[in-house]
Amino acid sequence: MKSKTPSDAQYLLGRTDREYERLMDQARWINPCTEKLFIDAGIGPGMCVLDIGCGVGDVSLLLGKLVGNTGEIVGIDQDGTALAKAEERTKEGRTRQDQISAR
């Protein structure tokens, strides 16, 4: 029997536009707590942060605000559709496009 690789694995809640919207709604609700956590952890201007499993980019966008113009965020995810949405969101002006890169 062939074992599943991470790219074969199914995300339990699905990989649909509706699920991506649900995750963005959830992030809007929880972002104040997440931001406080990152500030308390010492994340700040000029830092380079790797966001593993970045999905549609909510945490990456929040981190981008904290690291400022001199910092960099690299988001990676196995879901190419989610990564495309994360890249699209950076182009919408929510943060500097060259500050956050999805891979």
Image: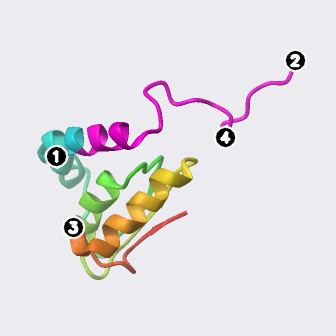
Q: Amino acid at mark 3?
A: Lys
- Disc number lying in front (3 or 1): 1
**Residue underneath mark 1:** 28
Q: Amino acid at mark 4?
A: Ser
Q: Residues within 10 Å of mark 1 (few under 14, many from 20)?
A: few
- Quarter where residue 37 is shown: top left
In 3D space, how far apart are the residues under numbered discs 4 and 1 (Cα atoms)? 28 Å
Left or right? Give the position of 55 relative to 40: right
- Disc number lying in front (4 or 3): 4
| SS majority, magenta | loop
Height in image: 69 above or below 50? below
Residue appearing at x 33%, y 38% in the figure: 18
Q: Which one is earlier in the sequence, the residue at label 4 or at label 1? A: 4
Q: Which one is earlier in the sequence, the residue at label 1 or at label 2? A: 2
Residue appearing at x 50%, y 53% in the figure: 81
Q: Residues within 10 Å of mark 4 (few under 14, many from 20)?
A: few
Q: Position of residue 25 (x, y in %)?
A: 20, 42
**Residue underneath mark 3:** 65
Q: Nearer the viewer, residue 22 or 18?
A: 18
Q: Position of residue 75 (x, y in %)?
A: 46, 59
Instruction: Give the structural element (helix, strand or loop) at label 3.
Output: helix
- Quarter where residue 57 is shown: bottom left
Q: Amino acid at mark 1?
A: Arg
Q: Are marks 2 and 4 in contact (CB under 8 Å)?
A: no
Q: Which one is earlier in the sequence, the residue at label 3 or at label 1? A: 1
Residue appearing at x 55%, y 63% in the figure: 103
Q: Is residue 9 magenta?
A: yes
